[in-house]
Image: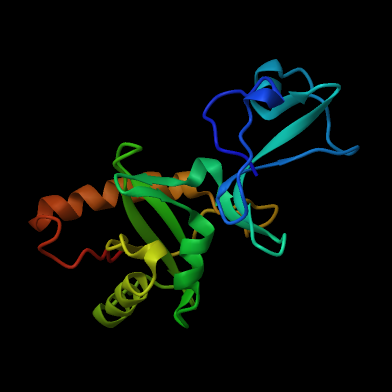
Amino acid sequence: IIAPAAGPIPSWREVRELPAGEIGEIIVKGPVVTRAYDHNDQESRQAKIVDDSSFWHRLGDMGYFDGQGRLWFCGRKAHRVLTGQGVMYTIPCEAVFNEHPRVARSALVGVGVPGRQQPVLIVELVGGGTDLDERLTGELRELARAHTLTGMIDTFLVHPAFPVDIRHNAKIFREKLARWAEEKVPAQADAGGRGQQDKTDFL
């Protein structure tokens, strides 16, 4: 686990390893890891770190080791929500809301400029539908406030069917959901002023 970097990391000397409990980029090395992408030098520079005669591969995933040496996955680096109060990671935040019996799955996205993004929690309901009623909204908000990780989440949207990879529908296209949320959230603010109304969308 290393400190995240936006651009390429040409050499292992530029890497800062993180201690247990600290979230960073997951990197791997081994005989099954390719040395470079085929005919894609730009991606190779971004993903590979030279370590003397060997190299490391940057997965693009975020995670951490706990005190027992177990690896915990926190989501894709590109899917982090970068707020003015800090970084939010999709998987641990979504796990809080996925425990609700009416939530089939959820997706955390950021709306706005990175560094000042507003966290938005989008849910897909059990059995489908788009009815995110007042009671459920209140329960989701209570869940958010009960956990340090999710305390900043105060905007909830419902989507009838998450866009997913047809090869395995566990892979949610959060980029598409973020664009969809950007169209919804400003409209709510225009309608009555954010913070003065129930920030819930009825699709």
Task: Name which quarter of the figure residue 16 lies in.
Answer: top right
Image spot of residue 193 (x, y percent): 10, 55
Q: Residue at x 83, y 36 (%)?
A: 33
Q: Quadrant of the C terminus?
A: bottom left
The N terminus sits in image quarter? top right
Above or below: residue 64 compared with residue 112? below
Q: Residue 94, relative to residue 2: is it above or below?
A: below
Residue 115: x and y in percent read: 33, 38
Left or right of 82, for residue 4: right
Q: Is residue 106 visible?
A: no
Q: Establish if 201 lies above or below 81.
A: below
Say whether residue 70 is left or right of residue 193.
right
Residue that sits furthest to the right in the current view: 31
Please name the residue shown 47% across and 44% down the image.
175
In the figure, 95 relative to 33: above or below? below
For the image, the number of numbered tags is 0
Towards the viewer: 188 or 40: 40
State left or right for residue 111 relative to residue 36: left
**Residue at (19% x, 51% y) in the render:** 187
- Name the spot of residue 140 as percent of width and height, x first: 34, 74
Pick the residue in front: 166 or 90: 90
Q: Quadrant of residue 136?
A: bottom left
| Residue 62, horizontal then vertical, whole percent | 59, 47
Is residue 203 visible in this depiction of the protein? Answer: yes
Image colouring:
rainbow
Residue at 42%, 66% (x, y): give it: 123
